Amino acid sequence: MIEYSFRIKHEGCWTNSFNDAFPNARASIIYSYLVHGTSVTMIEVTQVEEGEIDDLVDWLEDHPVMNTSRLVSFTSATNRGVVCLEGDYDTETEPVLNVLLGNSCFPTIPATVADGWEHWDVLAPTHEQVSRAHEELQQLGTVQIDSLHSPEFEGMFMGLLEVKKAIQNLSARQLEVLSLAIEEGYYDSPRSCKLKDLAEHDPTGVSTVGEHLRLSEAKILKAIGPMLDQPAKD
């Protein structure tokens, strides 16, 4: 398997001019697929104010390749929104994901959009498939390779199993408090809430909530520890 990380300025796509219209906003492409010739895309937008989200949705719908843009949800506490897009692409503005999947290159994490670039991390079975995907992507815009290497999958797989086991070993209460902390933005940078804010959802108080988090973090970080010894990407 080959791990291929790259960035692309996708000409004619909304990602190319997104930050020109909304300089502080960031977007992640959660998924995108074709239905009867129409591309349906779900994106998450962050760092966008509540009063700005409607303008952002309208801007996306007005983009030449888009038919509709619909706000699915918005959380004002974390300035995060989920938007569903439907658009008709041609061969010159085809979604990057279509090119990748057509060449058996599969994203490992959602692509991010920042400063006109789409950032992608994918896995492919062979160098030949990466080469074909790269050639087709160059027809869509400017492509820069960030890394290209064969990862140590055995160690990565075992590490992920240990992390999964650590999560399964959390108590029901630890898992509940940890999930709440993630949802409320306790681990965001900067943090969107503090321990006392989480404690408002828990009658046991700040110290108990903090102890649940510390124990959860300790179990998960001990499982992650061995993975930190893996060689860095080139």
Image (spheres, helix red, strand yellow):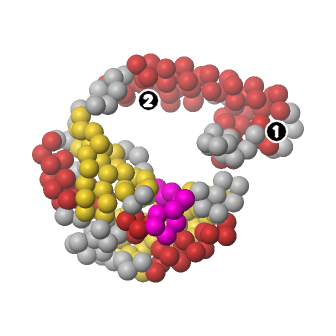
**Which residue carries the number 2 mark?**
160
Residue 153 shows which numbered tag?
Answer: none
Q: Quadrant of residue 155?
A: top left
Label 2: few (<14), some (14–19) or many (≥20) C-alpha neighbours in 10 Å: some
22 part of magenta stretch? yes
Indicate the quadrant containing the C terminus: top left, top right, bottom left or bottom right: top left
Instruction: Look at 51% across and 62% down and name the residue there.
Output: 23
Residue 186 horizontal/vertical position (percent): 68, 41
The magenta span reads 19-28
Q: Secondary structure at mark 1?
A: helix
Instruction: Look at 60% across and 61% down and name the residue there.
Output: 48
Q: Is residue 118 left or right of residue 183?
A: left
Label 1: few (<14), some (14–19) or many (≥20) C-alpha neighbours in 10 Å: some
Q: Amino acid at mark 1?
A: Lys
Residue 179 seen in render = no
Pointer 1 or 2: first along the chain: 2
Q: Is residue 105 left or right of residue 184?
A: left
User: Would you place residue 116 above or below residue 131 in this image?
Assistant: below
Residue 196 shows which numbered tag?
Answer: 1
